[in-house]
Image (spheres, grey):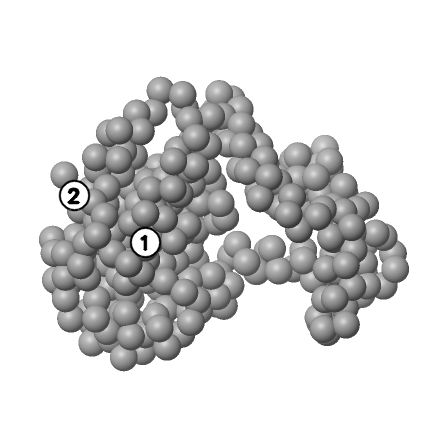
Amino acid sequence: MRKVGICGAGLIGASWAIGFANAGYKSLVYDNDPNSSENFKNIFDKLIQDIKLIDPDIDAEIIKSNIQLNCSMEKICEDSILIQESVVEDLKVKQDIYKQLDELTSKDTILASSSSYLVISKISEFVEHKHRCINAHPALPPHVVPFVEIAGSQDTSKEIINEALNIYKKANYAAILVKRETEGFVLNRLQGALLNEAVRLHEGGFASMEDIDIALKHALGIRWAFMGPFEIMDLNAPEGIKDSFSRYRTGIQNLARQQNTVPSYSDEYLNKLDKEQRQRLDYHDRSDRIEKRNKMIALIRKLKIELGEDV
């Protein structure tokens, strides 16, 4: 059984451990928090319930048997083909961790960071063997969203990139390649563009938070669950994607000119956002909403699998 090291046992790390274990890998988990094992067990039970909505035949005990908790840093590095680093989003912390991982692993072990915005060239700045360092950024919540985007730096070898893509695909993740290093990768750049426009519309008084969310939930989001923007454009006009862009490019370009501003995200505006959102959803009801979110995503994935639209 091939081994994968999990460095950090929070929600992201736990999800990675379960994902790899479910695909038949041995997941060795390290965390410097003495309570991490107990927390992991609690997280495990919750995540498995969501996964069972997708596949009721999944055997939780087999997955659990493939996960080893309370490992030392040295243990997760021993004979692992890949180390999935999922510690706090802090550059200095990640740089220190990477230096340790570089020293403890064999020189062919892939060092993969779950970072959302920090690029691997910065994280691996003080690493000797930079050729095997990559970003491997998942999507939230990662236990029911089987996605990872792989990005290297100028120092990362093509062989490592290809091997990483192969490992994640074998672990049943939809793995994409970010060809050039860029902050936010693909996922967060797309998400950020949408978030910025949502804020511009709300702050400018064009629509309420509720109505902006409705436009996404009941229109765009339904299509985006199984089609991306290029395929959507291809199907939107009789002659395909070129026809579609030709018909609408003036309008699209006009919008782009209007959207060429950066929201300030001032404390005053963030307080306004928080006040309005708490009127929509009481803070104490958020945990129930998160659980419902996870179940909804799991059921959407189940439908996609049944219709041949999943990984």
The amino acid pointed to by label 2 is Arg
Residue 55 percent coordinates (x, y): 41, 24
Q: Are marks 1 and 2 in contact (CB under 8 Å)?
A: no
Q: Is residue 196 above or below residue 11?
A: below
Q: Is residue 99 left or right of residue 216?
A: left
Q: Nearer the viewer, residue 227 or 134?
A: 134
Q: Tag 2, which secondary structure?
A: loop
Residue 146 visible in this rendered orientation of the protein? no
Q: Which residue is mark 2?
A: 2
Q: Tag 1, which secondary structure?
A: helix
Q: How would you rate the neighbour count of disc 2 (Cα within 10 Å): few for under 14, some for 14-19, many for 20 or more? A: few
The amino acid pointed to by label 1 is Ser
Q: Is residue 45 above or below residue 150?
A: above
Q: Quadrant of the N terminus?
A: top left
**Total tally of numbered discs in the picture:** 2
Q: Is residue 299 left or right of residue 28?
A: right
Q: Closer to the camera: disc 1 or disc 2? A: 1
Q: Nearer the viewer, residue 146 or 62?
A: 62
Residue 155 percent coordinates (x, y): 29, 71
Q: Which residue is mark 1?
A: 36
Q: CA distance from mark 1 to mark 2?
A: 24 Å
Residue 170 percent coordinates (x, y): 29, 38
